[in-house]
Amino acid sequence: NSHFGYRGTEDDEERRYFLETVSDAHPVRCDQQGRITVPQEHLEYAKIKDKVLVIGAVDHLELWNPDVYNEFIGQSSFTPKDRVRRYGWVEKDSE
Protein backbone atom coordinates (compact mmCIF):
# COMPACT_ATOMS: atom_id res chain seq x y z
CA ASN A 1 0.00 0.00 0.00
CA SER A 2 1.20 3.49 -0.77
CA HIS A 3 1.00 6.28 1.76
CA PHE A 4 0.99 9.93 0.74
CA GLY A 5 2.13 11.27 4.09
CA TYR A 6 -0.72 13.78 4.40
CA ARG A 7 -1.27 14.55 8.09
CA GLY A 8 -4.04 17.10 7.87
CA THR A 9 -3.76 20.85 7.91
CA GLU A 10 -5.42 23.96 9.25
CA ASP A 11 -4.97 25.54 5.79
CA ASP A 12 -8.24 25.15 3.86
CA GLU A 13 -6.56 25.67 0.47
CA GLU A 14 -3.97 22.97 1.19
CA ARG A 15 -6.76 20.61 2.21
CA ARG A 16 -8.73 21.38 -0.97
CA TYR A 17 -5.61 20.74 -3.06
CA PHE A 18 -5.05 17.40 -1.33
CA LEU A 19 -8.68 16.34 -1.73
CA GLU A 20 -8.73 17.27 -5.42
CA THR A 21 -5.44 15.58 -6.32
CA VAL A 22 -5.15 12.36 -4.35
CA SER A 23 -8.45 11.56 -2.70
CA ASP A 24 -10.80 8.97 -4.13
CA ALA A 25 -14.27 10.13 -3.11
CA HIS A 26 -17.38 8.00 -3.57
CA PRO A 27 -20.79 9.34 -2.55
CA VAL A 28 -22.66 6.83 -0.39
CA ARG A 29 -25.93 7.02 1.54
CA CYS A 30 -26.53 6.21 5.17
CA ASP A 31 -29.19 3.61 5.84
CA GLN A 32 -31.92 4.14 8.46
CA GLN A 33 -29.50 3.08 11.21
CA GLY A 34 -26.75 5.48 10.08
CA ARG A 35 -24.57 2.81 8.47
CA ILE A 36 -22.71 3.19 5.20
CA THR A 37 -21.41 0.67 2.70
CA VAL A 38 -17.71 1.11 1.99
CA PRO A 39 -17.07 0.85 -1.77
CA GLN A 40 -15.70 -2.54 -2.82
CA GLU A 41 -12.54 -1.08 -4.37
CA HIS A 42 -11.62 0.51 -1.02
CA LEU A 43 -12.24 -2.77 0.81
CA GLU A 44 -10.03 -4.59 -1.68
CA TYR A 45 -7.26 -1.97 -1.46
CA ALA A 46 -7.29 -2.20 2.34
CA LYS A 47 -7.52 -6.02 2.22
CA ILE A 48 -10.65 -5.88 4.38
CA LYS A 49 -12.77 -9.02 4.27
CA ASP A 50 -14.68 -9.88 7.44
CA LYS A 51 -12.97 -7.80 10.14
CA VAL A 52 -12.22 -4.10 10.16
CA LEU A 53 -10.33 -1.87 12.58
CA VAL A 54 -11.72 1.69 12.76
CA ILE A 55 -9.11 4.22 13.87
CA GLY A 56 -9.80 7.82 14.82
CA ALA A 57 -6.75 9.56 13.35
CA VAL A 58 -6.93 13.16 14.67
CA ASP A 59 -9.17 14.68 11.97
CA HIS A 60 -10.36 11.64 10.03
CA LEU A 61 -11.16 7.94 10.31
CA GLU A 62 -9.06 5.14 8.87
CA LEU A 63 -10.32 1.64 8.12
CA TRP A 64 -7.71 -1.13 8.33
CA ASN A 65 -7.56 -4.87 8.08
CA PRO A 66 -6.47 -5.68 11.68
CA ASP A 67 -3.68 -8.01 10.53
CA VAL A 68 -2.31 -5.44 8.07
CA TYR A 69 -2.45 -2.73 10.75
CA ASN A 70 -0.62 -4.87 13.33
CA GLU A 71 2.05 -5.76 10.76
CA PHE A 72 2.47 -2.08 9.81
CA ILE A 73 2.74 -0.97 13.45
CA GLY A 74 5.10 -3.85 14.24
CA GLN A 75 7.54 -2.73 11.54
CA SER A 76 8.48 0.40 13.49
CA SER A 77 11.95 0.50 14.99
CA PHE A 78 10.93 3.39 17.26
CA THR A 79 10.00 3.01 20.91
CA PRO A 80 7.17 5.18 22.27
CA LYS A 81 9.81 7.51 23.80
CA ASP A 82 11.57 7.75 20.41
CA ARG A 83 8.28 8.86 18.85
CA VAL A 84 7.76 11.54 21.51
CA ARG A 85 11.29 12.86 20.92
CA ARG A 86 10.91 12.83 17.14
CA TYR A 87 7.35 14.10 16.77
CA GLY A 88 6.77 15.96 20.03
CA TRP A 89 3.61 14.03 20.85
CA VAL A 90 2.71 13.35 24.45
CA GLU A 91 2.44 9.74 25.54
CA LYS A 92 -1.05 8.85 26.79
CA ASP A 93 0.34 7.52 30.10
CA SER A 94 2.25 10.73 30.84
CA GLU A 95 -0.72 13.12 30.61
Image: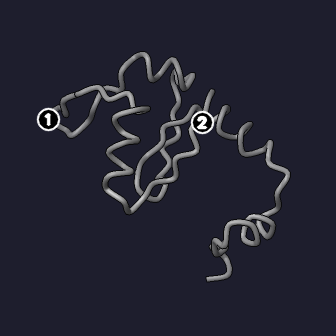
Placement of 20 over or under 78, stated as above or below: above
Q: Position of residue 85 (x, y in %)?
A: 76, 72
Q: Which residue is mark 2?
A: 3
- Report the front residue among 58 and 53: 58
Question: Camera-side residue: 68 or 12?
Answer: 12
Image vertical order of residue 5 relative to residue 57, above or below: above
Q: Residue at x 51, y 23 (%)?
A: 50
Q: Nearer the viewer, mark 2 or mark 1?
A: 2
Indicate the position of residue 12 as horizontal and vertical percent values. 31, 56
**What residue is drawn where x is 57% and y is 22%?**
47
**Cα distance between the residues tagged 2 and 1:** 34 Å
Res 70 → quadrant: top right
Q: Please tell me whether mark 1 sits on a helix, a strand or a loop.
A: loop
Is residue 67 rendered to the left or right of residue 36? right
- In the image, residue 70 sits, relative to residue 26, either above or below, namely below
- Residue sitting at x 66%, y 73%: 88
| Of the image marks 2 and 1, the number of the one nearer the N terminus | 2
Label 2 residue SS: loop
Q: Is residue 31 left or right of residue 51?
A: left
**In the rendered structure, which amino acid carries the disc numbered 2?**
His
Residue at mark 1? 32
Q: Quadrant of the C terminus?
A: bottom right
**Residue lying farthest to the right in this orientation:** 77
